Amino acid sequence: MTGTENPLLSIAFEIPFDRIRAEHVEPAFDELLADAARRLEAVAALPGERTFANTMLAYEAITERLDYALNIVRHLESVATYPELRAAYNAIQPKVSEFYSSIPLHDGLWRAIQSYADTPEAATLTGTRKRFLTKTLDAFKRAGADLPPEDKKRLAELDVELSTLTTRYGENVLDSTNAFSLLITEEAQLAGLPESARVAARESAEAKGQTGWRFTLQAPSYNAVMTYLDDAGIREKMYRAYVTRAAGGEHDNTALLPRILELRREKARLLGFADFADLVIEDRMAHTGERALRFLENLRDRTVEAFRRENEQLRRFRRGVDPDAPETLQPWDIAYWAEKQRIALYNFDEEALRPYFPLEPVVAGMFEIFRRVFGIRVAERTGVPTWDPQVHYFEIHDEATDELLGAFYADFYPRENKRGGGWMDVFLTGIPREAGGVLPHLGFICGNLNPPAGGKPALLTHHDVETIFHEFGHLLHHCLSRVEIRSLAGTNVAWDFVELPSQILENWCWERESLDLFARHWETGAPIPEDLFAAMRRARTYRAANAQMRQLSFGIVDLRLHREWDPGRDGDVVSYARRLLNEFSPAPLPPEHAMIASFTHLFASPVGYGAGYYSYKWAEVLDADAFSRFLEAGIFNREVGLAFRRAVLERGDSCDPAELYREFMGRDPDLQPLLIRLGLAA
């Protein structure tokens, strides 16, 4: 099958999603793997003098076509899957994983890179090129390049098995999530539920040929029930289904978890590390698992008193409303009663904001904010093939030069063939042209927001708005990159730095000046009333200690699983994780709680956020501190915005992230702005 016939064989900036089919996948990857293997052998066997171009740049180009096709197929399996595509993706996974794992274990290639490192030219390298060589040498050593042959063979086997098991883990979560639905036929049982959630549930039922209101474990449906539905029995049923996803039956991950942890531990020790956390974190800002854990525990110690106080206040509030209520709140009561308390304390109902956040004006307002701040112009283009009719395509230009910097797809609504959550990823990474400018980048952002319903546009919660801004921050980190080495460009940075560009953008969702650019009532066009805005701001720190403890719990259970868990001493992994999480929970977790079986961030890819979930909090410290500079100068200050663009968004991993941060702020990060923002400062 030629490149003309098989759309996965040719790199195209406008990806022909309308022509890509499951039957293209296996033949394409057979050819692409063979092509990459030929390129690898050519670099390794090159006669004559070693140069940066014929060794380092040639090494980087080995997997360029393979990367592109894999990005596309992996993406389609996440957003538009069907049985034949899943089968094809699963068929290529072991082969692709084995090839990627084999690259740093190839003796000839390793000798070639070492030979180049010993040349006079290599000794004169500076800047990005020097960093690329240094990081490549370190990465090869960390991947096992210096291991004896039998250990290299074992390492390749570990990577293939990890790839297979983590793919199955993610599929089990998706299938388990989709396997559950709850149909309510009595309208009286919907008491407390907002109209937007009722309409969405009714339309969900109609789409399945059912009469009534259908609820699922997808985030918009699940969160609405847990936050607003008066019927505690239904909340309990939904909660128990949610926290036991992929923990039994035909989509069971409980047997995969210990094996994944065992394989990761074996891999780390084979490579000379004490544990998987040290392997993963060595080249990140934290550098060691111990330092990452100390960071989280320090924040926990600063938060725990406020956490206990918040939970006692919630318990008393519930007893004040219902004197006959039990002393102890249940997990399915927390969000519901917290929302009641928030309304009582601040006269603020999150749902009251929804009419002011129709999706299209939110997106347009976001583009306008960052036009002002970063000097970019974003505009939609139609007629570009996509994977679903709901997907939009946008281009990003530099406002001053009109240079096309990048383009991206936006896929905002849930579907049963699409995984949950919000995320951003990459299709193509551009690099600077010799004649000037940069080849454009191509990426995408995905969400699972409430779709239009009942004749109304898609109306978002404030949290949904933050999610869109967050993913757009990742997207800008990719599309504004001006790094000459692809593997050091864009979001290819230390994982405890990668969330800075995304999380800092969320701050603009809280400022009156920026909200007034887009937060308008979908019917009247009126801005958010001042009393509602003031209530939203006051409520920002409501149960902030609980929100922080929740994030810390995920980071700590992640690190302890990857550093300390011992099945002989600690028992099965689900029970161990539940015991750890229980210390951070505002209500006792039920004995069947098995959230770890559906924690895709940690276990749905060979590495992912495994031993790296602490990164969210680490980057939150960075973003709160960095945004303080915008607050001082003005949130639309172009000078500060361009300084952030030049120091962070354009620089990728071309420099140590601690140096990039210091370049923007003039100093190291300060923890205090985060504690102040959360209302937790002493």
Image (spheres, rainbow, N blue to C red):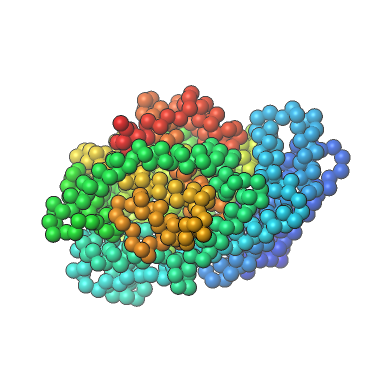
Closer to the camera, 464 or 199?
Answer: 464
- Please indicate whether residue 681 sits to the left or right of residue 343 in the image: right
Q: Position of residue 602 (x, y in %)?
A: 50, 54
For the question of whether residue 457 can be seen, the reply is: no
- Please indicate whether residue 148 sits to the left or right of residue 628 in the image: right
- Residue 256 lies, with reference to residue 342, above or below; the image says below
Q: Where is residue 522 in the image (x, y as percent from the top left)?
A: 28, 50
Closer to the camera, 265 or 118?
Answer: 265
The residue at the point 44 percent across, 34 percent down is: 622
Residue that extends furthest to the front in the rendered view of this protein: 569
* Quadrant of the image containing the C terminus: top left
Count of numbered labels shown in the rendering: 0
The residue at the point 45 percent across, 73 percent down is: 249
Q: Position of residue 142 (x, y in %)?
A: 66, 45
Residue that extends furthest to the top in the rendered view of this protein: 666
Q: In which quarter of the image is residue 525?
A: top left
Q: In which quarter of the image is residue 483?
A: top right
- Residue 189 lies, with reference to residue 288, above or below; the image says below
The residue at the point 84 percent across, 45 percent down is: 46
Closer to the camera, 380 or 299?
Answer: 299
The residue at the point 66 percent across, 51 percent down is: 270
- Please indicate whether residue 3 sits to the left or right of residue 606 in the image: right
Q: In which quarter of the image is residue 582?
A: bottom left
Q: Position of residue 412 (x, y in %)?
A: 42, 55
- Residue 202 lies, with reference to residue 516, above or below; the image says below
For the question of whether residue 558 can be seen, the reply is: yes
* Quadrant of the image containing the N terminus: bottom right
